[in-house]
Amino acid sequence: MPQKFDVLVIGGGAAGLLCAIEAGKRGRRVAVLEHADRIGKKILISGGGRCNFTNIHCQPQNFLSANPHFAKSALARYTPADFLALVEKHRIPYHEKTLGQLFCDNSASDITNMLEAECRAAGVKIILNSKITEVSRDTQFVIRCESAEYRAAALVVATGALSIPKMGATPFGYDLARQFGLKIITPRPGLVPLVLAPADRKRYSELAGVSTEVIAQANQTPFREKMLFTHRSLSGPAILQISSYWQEGKPIRIDLAPDRDATAAIREAGTRNLTAAEKAFQQFLPKRLAETWLHHNAPRSWTNPALAALEAQVHAWSLTPAATEGFEKAEVTVGGIDTDELSSKTMECRKIPGLFFIGEVVDVTGQLGGFNFQWAWASGAAAGRVL
């Protein structure tokens, strides 16, 4: 005999759980089907295990989508303050790190425990190890699992996307969307290190572990944060940020000396040579980076025009990455269910009443710093409050 509910939510992550809580509070009979052996696996590893659960400066412009206006409605109706009220209700200690990013003081499990407690209070049933074999629709949605069958008038797809497959990420949500004839913006890795081209890797791989503050830019979108060299890639917050905007085959630009006159000390020096330049650059760059970068980029002469060219280059160092590190290293997925298919107020599919898509599976991607969690909470609430 099939088990009957008012709402079935596929996916026990951030968006799915918040949606289930909101629907349960409205008296709906809700079941969350989670394919893993526990809820919120990506929540638990986020923020170094402390969960950067929102950002107090969250604005629509912190999100990337083919339709930049789509996220506005949900974000306006469930704000960081709304989620923070829930955190404070459960007396979870937290702190602001930088740039409005809020983290748990203790552990990300505080957030999953909170969500689980809210689910219990709302009468939500969480069913783990749910291996779905078929989804169909007659008068209702029918989900068949290996050991059970479920029916409901409303189906919410909160399956996440392709980032971090070792945590269970799959294309299930996209496959389901295609089954129902929905359009998908081609998914690609976001918030991901950028792999250096072979020639640049040969030049700079010895800098692995070196970090410095930069302004990095891709596709006219700049971010001022730290950049980190690895053995094969550029990483760190500045690079992760621009990776979501980067297009394959296009260059990125890096300002290694934000707000500085990088060559002033060289021009003023009595002697102008590579040693003097290295000493000047070490005022704003780590020693190894200053020496290595100048070794490959220093001018042949130290005339004023050559120094002017060097000044321009240090503020607009151009590199063309070979690729990204892929979904294995990506924190999020850019692209997903085309927002033209959904109502921005409810997240319901325009073509198929009762079918909802929320969270990362949708073509809305936040910048680094808690924004993707806020989209999960906001889109989950938008659906949960109308189910």
Image (spheres, grey):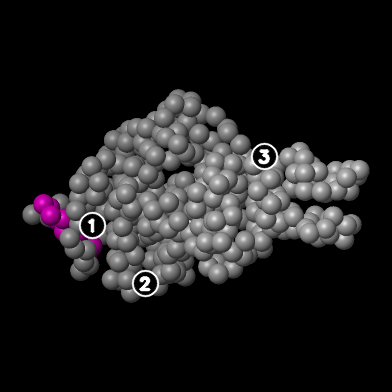
Provide the secondary structure element on which disc 2 rests: loop
Residue 286 numbered tag: 3
Report the residue marked by disc 2. Answer: 182
Report the residue marked by disc 1. Answer: 152
Spatial separation of the CA atoms under disc 2 and disc 3: 50 Å
Quadrant holding the C terminus: bottom left
Provide the secondary structure element on which disc 1 rests: strand
Q: Answer few, some or many: residues within 10 Å of disc 3's Cα (few below 14, many 20 plus, some between 14 and 19).
A: few
Where residue 289 appears, x then y in whole percent?
A: 65, 45
> Is residue 106 something one can see in this rendering?
yes
Which of label 2 and label 1 is nearer to you?
Answer: 2
Residue 310 counted in the magenta span = no
Q: Amino acid at mark 1?
A: Ala
In-front residue for pair 96/348 = 96
Majority secondary structure of magenta residues: strand
Please give the name of the residue rendered at 55% of the width and 67% of the height, measured from the top-left corner. Answer: 247
Where residue 9 appears, x then y in whole percent?
A: 29, 52
